Image: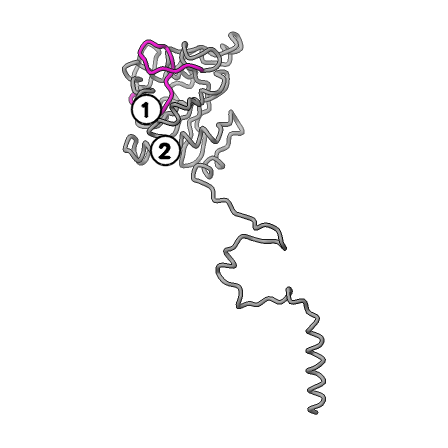
């Protein structure tokens, strides 16, 4: 009997000696660190999982399929300024609407977006005019001076509404010193205009121009203004490196 047991033991030892060591799993070696490590297939490089920023996550939720797509670079800057204005108490903690005008785009493009930062929903995507002396189809020149008839780049906080020469209008408070803080005294406001339309652009090869105001289509003026009035953020973007590197709201 002892010889039989010994023979079986030897046979088992020989048989298992041919199992490759790299197929043996040592359960004690599986630790929390191992489970958290990047996935590795054979000798391939680990697959790294990229952590998305808040701006990237929100941007991915926005559906641009029905209009013009806002570039992520511009959106990220707009959202950063929006958050910094909120931290500084310039807008309410409950404010969630962000209006972006990308003046690097053709004025014949729907280059204004009103975005709900809580839901990622685009409430409006519209044409918007720049100032008469800012450029023809494209904006090139900006000013903070009175009577310049030029647009002013930077962050604004929307204020109260009123009835003026251009009809229902929205006052804008410029928050970038030296770039748009003269907006109130210059009467740079949002209003409707007949020259901001696809029909006008088809006839003149560009939409019309304002005296520096971000004018919108006449039929959208009241809906847009009533949506964004009362302490919400408007950002007029232009890739001016002097502004981008000095704006308090982009560099806080």
Part of the protein shown in magenta = 140-160
Whether residue 158 is visible here, answered yes or no, is no
Residue 2 or 95: which is nearer the viewer? 2
Give the SS element for disc 2: loop
Q: Check residue 176 for magenta coloring.
A: no
Give the SS element for disc 1: loop
Structural crowding at the residue carrying mark 1, measured as other residues with C-alpha within 10 Å and reported as few (<14), some (14–19) or many (≥20): some
Q: Check residue 147 for magenta coloring.
A: yes
Q: Where residue 39 sits: x, y (%)?
A: 56, 53
Q: Which residue is mark 2?
A: 96
Examine the residues drawn in magenta and state their main secondary structure.
loop
Of badges 2 and 1, the one in the foreground is 1
Residue 95 or 85: which is nearer the viewer? 85
Q: Residue at x 37, y 10 (%)?
A: 149
Q: How many marks?
A: 2
Indicate left or right for 153 with 181 as reference.
Answer: right
Disc on res. 4: none
Classify 117 as above or below 196: below
Report the quarter where the C terminus lies.
top left
Q: Where residue 168 sits: x, y (%)?
A: 34, 15
Determine the image quadrant of residue 184: top left
Q: Residue furthest bottom?
A: 1
Q: Residue at x 48, y 15 (%)?
A: 138
Q: Are marks 2 and 1 in contact (CB under 8 Å)?
A: no
Q: Which residue is mark 1?
A: 176
Task: Determine the CA span between mark 2 and mark 1.
Answer: 20 Å
Q: Earlier in the sequence, mark 2 or mark 1?
A: 2
Q: Residue at x 57, y 50 (%)?
A: 46
Report the quarter where the N terminus lies.
bottom right
């Amino acid at each position: 009997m002892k010889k039989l047991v010994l023979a079986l033991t030897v046979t088992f030892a020989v048989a298992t000696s041919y199992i490759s060591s790299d197929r043996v799993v040592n359960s004690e070696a599986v630790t929390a660190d191992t489970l958290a490590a990047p996935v590795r297939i054979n000798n391939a490089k680990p697959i790294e999982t990229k952590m998305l920023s808040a701006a990237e996550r929100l941007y991915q939720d926005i559906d641009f399929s029905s209009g013009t797509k806002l570039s992520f670079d511009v959106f990220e800057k707009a959202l950063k300024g929006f958050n910094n204005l909120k931290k500084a108490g310039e807008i309410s903690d409950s404010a969630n609407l962000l209006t972006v005008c990308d003046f690097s785009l053709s004025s014949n493009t729907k280059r204004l977006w009103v975005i709900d930062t809580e839901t990622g929903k685009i409430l409006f995507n519209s044409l918007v005019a720049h100032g008469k002396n800012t450029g023809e189809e494209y904006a090139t020149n900006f000013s903070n001076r009175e009577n310049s008839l030029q647009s002013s780049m930077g962050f604004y906080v929307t204020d109260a509404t009123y009835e003026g020469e251009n009809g229902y209008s929205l006052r804008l408070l410029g928050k970038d010193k030296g770039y748009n803080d003269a907006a109130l005294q210059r009467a740079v406001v949002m209003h409707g205009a007949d020259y901001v339309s696809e029909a006008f652009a088809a006839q003149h090869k560009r939409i019309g121009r304002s005296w520096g105001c971000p004018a919108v289509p006449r039929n959208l003026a009241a809906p847009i203004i009533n949506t964004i009035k009362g302490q919400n953020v408007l950002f007029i973007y232009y890739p001016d490196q002097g502004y981008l590197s000095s704006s308090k709201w982009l560099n806080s």
